[in-house]
Image (cartoon, grey):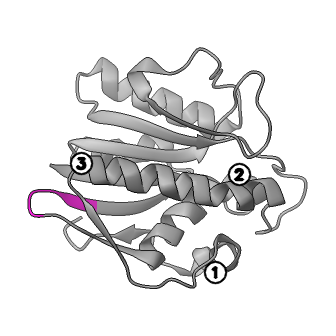
Amino acid sequence: MNILILGIGNILFQDEGMGAHFVHYLDEKYEFESEHNSVSIVDGGTLAHRLIPLIVKFDHVIVIDCIDANDSKPGDIYFFDFENAPKEIDWQGSAHEIEMLQTLNMIQMNGDLPKTQVLGIIPKRVADDTTFELSDEVINATSTMEKTIIEHLKSLEITPKIKKDDITITHISQVSYKREIINDPKI
């Protein structure tokens, strides 16, 4: 099975960039191994519809993004199957969140949507200023996001190997714009 971990977000707008920052964090910290499966990590930024040719190449996609949900607070984490989103997810967040929803819906209408999971975080600060700084709530939620995705990958027979243990999301948020957006030589 070919698995895509796809980070979505605008890194210029504070917590809005968490999906993109988080995939760089995973890429820097881990190496993912499996006898039967492959893992590709992509920073999709705010490309939305332009990601369609990439997404349809995979068997399983994990989208990491900021989301909006009723009765939630900054730093809350949601992990769900795209086709069975919890009722509190209202998809009324940023423009790119809505575009990503439209993108996944278009792929689904064509019958090409791979199994898709969403790892979403409720942001605190979005677009107050142009900065790479993340809120404390989002920084503190990183460990829950990491634990959630690692457990999910293990359930897909992926073994995470720590290659660099001293990585923090705060450091990554300051340098992720300098990194490659795709970590897979096959793409």
Q: Mark 1 and 3 residues: CB-CB less than 8 Å, in contact?
A: no
**Residue 151 seen:** yes
Q: Which mark is residue 156?
A: 3
The numbered mark, 2 or 1, whose residue comes first in the sequence reads 2
Could you say where residue 44 lies in the image, as x and y percent from the top left?
Answer: 48, 55
Distance from Cα at disc 2 to Cα at disc 3: 28 Å
Give the amino acid type for the residue marked by disc 1 in the picture. Answer: Val
Could you say where residue 168 lies in the image, as x and y percent from the top left?
Answer: 63, 76
Would you say 163 lies left or right of 38 here? Answer: right
**Residue 13 seen:** no
Q: Mark 2 and 3 residues: CB-CB less than 8 Å, in contact?
A: no
Callout 1 secondary element = helix
Name the foreground residue: 91 vs 39: 39
The numbered mark, 2 or 3, whose residue comes first in the sequence reads 2
Give the amino acid type for the residue marked by disc 2 in the picture. Answer: Glu
- Say which residue appears at 23% left-offset and 29% top-offset: 112
- Say which residue appears at 78% left-offset and 23% top-offset: 71
- Say which residue appears at 19% left-offset and 52% top-offset: 2
Could you say where residue 16 lies in the image, as x and y percent from the top left?
Answer: 71, 51
Tally of numbered tags? 3
Would you say 32 lies left or right of 26 here? Answer: left
Distance from Cα at disc 1 to Cα at disc 3: 30 Å
Residue beneath label 2, please? 16
Magenta span contains residue 126: no
Start-end of magenta stretch:
35-39
Residue beneath label 1, please? 175
Would you say 171 lies left or right of 85 here? Answer: right
Q: Which of the 4 image quarters holds residue 66? A: top right
Distance from Cα at disc 2 to Cα at disc 1: 16 Å
The numbered mark, 1 or 3, whose residue comes first in the sequence reads 3
